[in-house]
Amino acid sequence: MNWSGRSLAGGCFAVIAALGAWSGQGHAQQAYPTRNITMIVPFAAGGPTDVIARIVTGHMAQTLGQTIIIENVVGAGGTTASARAARATPDGYTLITGHMGTHAASVPLYPNLAYHPEKSFEPVALLAGTPILILARKDFPAKDLKEFIAYVKANESKVNAAHAGVGSVSHVSCQLLESILKIKPVSVPFNGTGPAMNALVAGQVDYMCDQIVNAVPQINGGTIKAYAVATPERNPSLPDVPTTKEAGLPEFQAQAWNAIFAPKGTPKEIIEKVNAAAAKALNDENVKKRLLELGSVIPAPADRTPEALGTLVKSEVAKWTPVLKPAN
Ligand code: ASP
């Protein structure tokens, strides 16, 4: 399976939606959830994981009848937050929106990883596929992908690449690109591609490989350049951006994904309830519209079950381990 915005200013916490817990629910209060749910986002506010989590949980909060609080816990390519989520009480009140990095690629990259995506978590729901784009600051001296390749090869020691920490999607995707191009640029880590994108827009870093969600508003606003999307087809949200195949680098194919996980041992009824709320959110016209406008790929119903996510995680760990082990 090929699953491989800007946000509210500043603060680490944001209340997504507060709903009257009492509205018409009477004694159903006893059933999960009876209080606020914390959704850990393992990267800074304003990045793709944060934006997707906020869009989807905003709707899920209505279904579940409780506030979902987004808590951005940053560091170590999302693995700090994931370790914390893995250790949380498995009662459905602490969840995490992880992704291809935190719940697959981190395994070969962190020999002492404090959790294992399969053994420490219950898969809950796949939220979105996110094609990867090759992006650069708007005055980067290359007008298309061919020129970009020539330039970074000729100036390898001078160019730098922004990313969201070792094992993040932006890090792993650009590592793939750089191994294809056989270059080793200077690497500039951030706590998420929200802040990395700010640095790209400000012209402080040269290029980045990022999940599309972060980039569409910037590309359309002309504040950064997009050389190619690393999927077989163009993305409807960016009809003018060529695919890597069209632009002359068909070997570079990359699509990431974001999904909700719960600590291992979370009761099945709770997993099912959260999964159903996520599935309902993905069926909502407004949620769909917002995700599609940002270039996400909405999972087909068959891919939305906890079991399908478990299978995806297994296959992604198996896929990334041999690719990233040598780099490690
Ligand atoms: N794009 C991720 C975010 O900040 C970080 C990454 O994995 O690159 O949400």
Image (tube, rainbow, N blue to C red):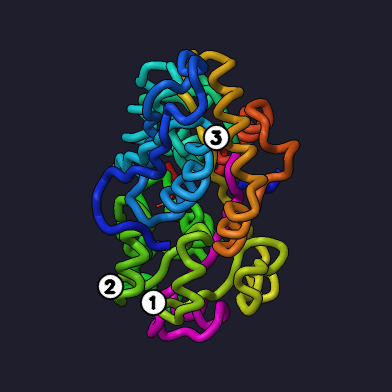
Quarter assignment of residue 306: top right
Return the residue found at the far left.
11
Between circles 3 and 2, the one closer to the viewer is: 3
Position of 71 with respect to 299 (left or right) is left
Residues rendered magenta in the picture = 126-152
Three-letter amino acid code at disc 2?
Gln
Residue at image coords 34%, 35%: 81
Q: Residues within 10 Å of mark 3 (few under 14, many from 20)?
A: some
Q: For this rendering, which residue is in front, 320 or 50?
A: 50
> Which structural element holds mark 3?
helix
> Which structural element holds mark 2?
loop
Q: Residues within 10 Å of mark 1 (few under 14, many from 20)?
A: many
Find the distance from the CA under tag 3 to the CA under tag 2: 42 Å
Q: Could you tell me if residue 325 is visible in this image?
A: no
Give percent across and percent down for residue 108: 47, 35
Return the residue at label 3.
Answer: 63
Return the residue at label 2.
Answer: 204
Residue at image coords 37%, 16%: 89
Return the residue at label 1.
Answer: 137
Is label 1 in contact with label 3 (beta carbons under 8 Å)?
no
Residue at image coords 47%, 70%: 217
